[in-house]
Image (cartoon, grey):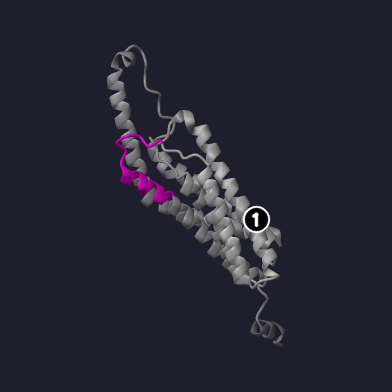
Amino acid sequence: MVGRLLLRGMLAGVVAGLLAFGFARVFGEPPIESAIAFEAHVAHHHMEAHSDHHTSGETDEPELVSRTTQAGLGLFVAVVVYGVAIGGLYALVFAFVYGRFGQLSPRATAALLAAAAFVSLVLIPALKYPANPPAVGAPETIGSRTALYFAMLVISVAALVFAIGLAKGLASRYDGWSAALVGAAAYVAIVLIAGYALPAVNEVPEHFSAAVLWNFRVASLGLQAVLWTIIGLLFGFLAERMLAPPSRSRLYQAGAPR
């Protein structure tokens, strides 16, 4: 059964990746182009200020991959492969959790799992350390910024696991809604404390367009939202057809004499 679910998760990831690629092309590329133009503008002024060094033998490094390829084929391959990988991992987690939280249907389980994954893996870390376009962020701090981002991600996932365990433990003594609300409150409290404790990072250059920065960050979250929504809904549909018991009419039709 796990293998069949894995194939369905990867198929859902392919479809999600294709739609996410379209979203990225329409909404993600314009702010990236604006950020690259700003970066080129700053580099041009820097070169003019140090023109004596530039003319003494320094040459610009050749572009290994053209911008057209990056925004086209490169983006397509990256997003689709990412979608397939996420869909496969999501299917494996679904296979583990299905049936462990009451009588939820495959579709309901898939939708809740996708929502929980988006919130814990994408939304909460991005609220503390949002994605940055080109020209934002110092190259020498990329290691520390990456470490802080993953620290927030790990805390978010650990808090989610703790909150689910807490809710399950309380469900035996209280009604399901009360237990779920306590678990959700515990998760929010943990991530708020972590967000407050971890250091902030603000390396936006002076005069960088606030609109470009906002549009890029919204597009980054939007791409992930498209990906997880499609995976959750499509995989839920495919899993329902595979796992749901046949209806009485189907059983009658299968057993009726021909």
Q: Quadrant of residue 6?
A: bottom right
Which residue is found at the position 62% from the left and 58% from the top? 163
Q: Quadrant of residue 176?
A: bottom right
* Left or right for 13, reference 201: right
Q: Is 111 a magenta residue?
A: no
The quarter of the image holding the C terminus is: bottom right
User: Which element carries disc 1, helix, strand or loop?
Assistant: helix
Question: Residue 31's spot in the image, x, y percent?
Answer: 35, 44
Q: Amino acid at mark 1?
A: Phe
Give me the residue at 55% from left, 45% from top: 152
10 vs 213: above or below: below
Image quadrant assignment for residue 61: top left
Residue closer to the observer: 14 or 137? 137
Question: Which range is magenta?
Answer: 203-220
| Picture layout, residue 221 above or below residue 49 | below
Q: How many marks?
A: 1
* Residue 208 within the magenta-colored segment of the rendering: yes
- Residue 246 seen in render: yes
Secondary structure predominantly adopted by residues drawn in magenta: helix
Residue closest to the eye, 167 or 91: 167
Residue 77 in the image: state x and y as whole percent.
50, 45
> 85 or 190: which is nearer to us?
190
Q: Which residue is mark 1?
A: 162
Mark 1 Cα-neighbour bin, 10 Å: few <14, some 14–19, many ≥20: some
Instruction: Name the spot of residue 184 as percent of width and height, x first.
Output: 57, 61
Q: Residue at x 29, y 31 (%)?
A: 41
Residue 5 visible in the picture = no
Counting from the top left corner in percent of width and height, residue 198 is at 52, 41
